[in-house]
Image (cartoon, helix red, strand yellow):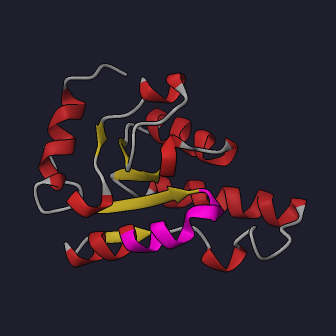
Amino acid sequence: MPEIEAVTICSSSKFYDTAQRAEAAFRRLGMTVYTPRYDFDEQHVQVNESDKIQLTRDFLAKIAKSDAIFVVANGGYAGVSVCIEVGYAVAQGKVVLFSEQPTEFALRALVDTVIPIEEIGPGLRSVARAEVAGRSR
């Protein structure tokens, strides 16, 4: 099976600092990393409806180009947009990685691997893919 070469980081804007740490860890592995638009941090800027629609469409296109998604789930939290992104990734057959076990039980059914950011390393490329092979979608 092919290894994970490209990953999209999914995160609530309140966790962008953590998302940037995950981005750095994946880049150290030489992976292609797609990220949220950090400049649209909803903690600091007002995002209107048309912006949110365009951001969502653009972000789903990033997921489509990836082999996997990595969800930053501080405290197990994943907001509505992240839940949509996870559903899209699963429908696309992508590997679904979470930084922490999600508190939402329905999301737990879609997680392939929980891997804390500190543990992102070279073995992730094949371990996550191998675990997905046994899960029927």
Is 14 above or below relative to 24?
A: above
**Residue 73 seen anywhere in this rendered image of the structure:** no
- The quadrant the C terminus occupies is top left
Among all residues in the image, which is located at the extreme top? Answer: 136
The spot of residue 53 in percent (x, y) is: 79, 57
Residue 14 within the segment the image draws in magenta: yes
Question: What residue is shown at x 21% (from left), y 58% (from top)?
Answer: 119
Question: Residue 1 versus residue 109: which sits nearer the camera?
Answer: 109
The spot of residue 125 in percent (x, y) is: 17, 54
The spot of residue 103 in percent (x, y) is: 52, 32
Question: Residue 79 versus residue 65: which sits nearer the camera?
Answer: 79
The boundaries of the magenta stretch are: 12-21
The spot of residue 6 in percent (x, y) is: 32, 62
Is 95 above or below relative to 39?
A: above
**Residue 66 seen anywhere in this rendered image of the structure:** yes
Toward which corner of the image does residue 113 lie, by quadrant? top left
- The quadrant the N terminus occupies is top left
Question: Residue 124 versus residue 76: which sits nearer the camera?
Answer: 76
Question: What residue is shown at x 38% (from left), y 34% (from top)?
Answer: 111
| Residue 94 shown left or right of residue 129 in the figure | right
Question: What residue is shown at x 14% (from left), y 37% (from top)?
Answer: 130
